[in-house]
Image (tube, rainbow, N blue to C red):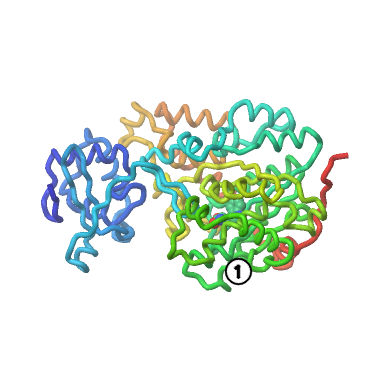
């Protein structure tokens, strides 16, 4: 059945939609779009409470008020919802007016998409990380690894690791073996500088990396891929390069040891030993291989096709002779979000053929968007995330207004049934940033039992984020151009490869 913009929705269709919203946050899946606004306008009255999922979706869209007119347009011309044999076709109003015709029908995803350019879950419970471990062939960060980590470092593993925020790894045991033998490794992570405004999600790998640097007392290289962003985005090369230096300030503000950290822009470093290693990788990886891993095709620009070689080489200590001298076999550990794994699968594949060590990896899950979208946050949608430049007031407003709530609609119902921590974005954020294990557990209990209200939960988060961002901004203010230059100058770092 086709629902045009003016036909009221029948009970039968409401039930079908209710089923649909059991597994989908929004009409288009996991971000709001004009399709939500269109569907919303079809309702003459609020759908009844017993259609719980539809009711929740409706209230959520209603909470945007007239802001829903600003939801992005559909990427597709129309979406077909096929539920219980009923087809609901939602046509984007704007496109209808412009094109006067319907476009290709798009079905729901049957599998999560996770690659360096797309992260999209097929269910609103988010990415199925267990499945990803199977698909990618990595290993789970399990209790045995955590115990060994603690024994060797004499430190309780970071709460990101204990709480499954960093959930997967490759060859972390090899790194621990090295440490046990009194040898050192080095850390490598990076960022693609595509916008000035970094958000909370961007900080996660850097927070983890700083902690690892402190615990293991090891050197760190941070790659800023201004070249990558130039090749993939509609941006000027000079602009990408400038963004690299801007972003470096936020990265430095995480607190990396200036004596042990080298930050670099690809555009400015390329040449010498680094480029020699790029060439070696290029010669040993075929187009067929990168096509298989990254999905390039004949119309991809040739810069993209060779770029994976550039993200690969910082894993090899011989790329940085000014840091590692003659040492060509120092192992590397890369903390990163799991979407970067394809680069390092390729790297691990080619490394032995070049006589280099395979890098080890620690993979993180994605930081959820405020709307409960279980995909990565977007720098282009300012309401999808908390930015490092947000004021205390903006933080408060965004959390209160946009953070998807697992709370119930009425006070009585909430007190009786309790909130759902599994879908509640404020609670998810607390898992990232509230270190106090006991308090977190208390909140979980009180919120799930209904003793704690959404407003109280949000308040606790707001206080933590306000302090965190305030401190970050204070540190960033102190990062002068001269300090950036120091971090970004090729130079020896202060460390010894073998402990005395
Ligand atoms: N490609 C990454 C991005 O777009 C940046 C990056 C380069 C990176 N090297 C890395 C990320 C190593 C993690 C680890 O953000």
Residue 286 as seen in the image, left or right of residue 8: right
Task: Pick the quarter of the image with the C terminus.
Answer: top right
The quarter of the image that holds ligand 1 is bottom right
Q: Residue furthest right?
A: 500
Left or right of 353: which side holds 123? left
Q: Is residue 128 left or right of residue 168?
A: left
Observer able to see residue 139 = yes
For the residue pair 182 and 435, the one nearer the viewer reads as 182
Can I make out residue 469 in this image? no
Label 1: few (<14), some or many (≥20) within 10 Å?
many
Q: Nearer the viewer, residue 89 or 477?
A: 89
- Expressed as whole percent of the image width and height from the top left, the position of residue 286 reads 55, 56
Where residue 13 appears, x then y in whole percent? 16, 41
The one nearer the camera, 342 or 244, is 342
Q: Where residue 161 sits: x, y (%)? A: 60, 36
Query: Compared to 136, does 203 lie above or below?
Result: below
| Residue found 44% across the figure and 63% down from its top | 298
Q: How many marks?
A: 1
Residue 16, by quadrant, is: top left
Which residue occupies 31% across, 55% down?
A: 33
> Residue 135 placed where, x, y %?
47, 38
Kindly identify which residue carries mark 1: 241
Numbered disc 1: secondary structure: helix
Q: Is residue 479 left or right of residue 396?
A: right
For ligand 1, tell me if the residue under mark 1 lies within 8 Å.
no
């Amino acid at each position: 059945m086709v629902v045009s913009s003016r036909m009221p929705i029948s009970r039968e269709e409401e039930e079908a939609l209710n089923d649909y919203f059991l597994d989908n946050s929004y009409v288009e899946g996991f971000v709001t779009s004009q399709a939500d606004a269109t569907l919303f306008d079809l309702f003459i009255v609020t759908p009844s409470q017993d259609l719980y999922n539809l009711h929740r979706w409706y209230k959520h869209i209603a909470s945007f008020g007239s802001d829903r007119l600003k939801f992005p347009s559909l990427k597709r011309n129309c979406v077909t919802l096929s539920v219980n044999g009923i087809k609901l076709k939602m046509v984007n109003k704007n496109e209808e007016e412009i094109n006067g015709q319907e476009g290709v029908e798009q079905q729901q995803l049957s599998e999560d998409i996770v690659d360096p350019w797309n992260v999209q879950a097929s269910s609103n419970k988010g990415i199925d990380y267990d499945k990803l471990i199977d698909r990618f062939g990595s290993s789970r960060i399990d209790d045995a690894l955590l115990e060994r980590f603690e024994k060797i470092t004499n430190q309780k593993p970071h709460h990101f690791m204990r709480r499954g925020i960093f959930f997967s790894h490759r060859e972390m045991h090899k790194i621990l073996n090295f440490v046990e033998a009194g040898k050192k490794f080095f850390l490598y992570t990076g960022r693609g500088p595509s916008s000035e405004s970094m958000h909370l999600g961007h900080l996660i790998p850097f927070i983890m990396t700083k902690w690892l640097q402190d615990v293991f007392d090891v050197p760190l290289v941070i790659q800023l891929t201004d070249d990558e962003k130039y090749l993939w985005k509609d941006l000027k090369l000079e602009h990408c390069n400038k963004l690299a230096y801007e972003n470096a300030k936020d990265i430095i503000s995480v607190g990396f040891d200036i004596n042990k950290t080298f930050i670099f822009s690809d555009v400015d470093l390329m040449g010498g030993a680094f480029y020699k290693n790029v060439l070696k990788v290029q010669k040993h990886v075929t187009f067929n291989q990168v096509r298989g891993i990254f999905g390039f095709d004949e119309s991809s620009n040739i810069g993209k096709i060779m770029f994976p070689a550039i993200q690969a080489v910082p894993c090899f200590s011989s790329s940085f002779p000014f840091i590692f001298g003659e040492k060509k076999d120092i192992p590397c550990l890369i903390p990163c979000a799991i979407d970067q794994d394809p680069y390092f699968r390729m790297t691990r594949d080619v490394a032995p053929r070049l006589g280099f060590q395979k890098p080890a990896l620690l993979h993180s899950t994605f930081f959820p968007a405020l709307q409960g979208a279980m995909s990565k946050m977007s720098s282009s949608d300012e309401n999808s995330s908390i930015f490092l430049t947000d004021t205390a007031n903006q933080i408060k407003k965004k959390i209160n207004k946009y953070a998807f709530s697992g709370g119930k609609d009425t006070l009585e119902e909430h007190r009786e049934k309790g909130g759902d921590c599994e879908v509640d974005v404020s609670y998810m954020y607390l898992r990232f940033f509230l270190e106090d294990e006991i308090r977190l557990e208390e909140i979980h209990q009180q919120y799930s039992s209904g003793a704690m209200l959404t407003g109280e939960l949000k308040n606790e988060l707001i206080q933590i984020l306000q302090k965190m961002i305030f401190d970050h901004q204070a540190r960033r203010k102190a990062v002068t151009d001269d300090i950036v230059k120091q971090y970004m100058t090729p130079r020896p770092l202060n460390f010894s490869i073998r402990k005395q």
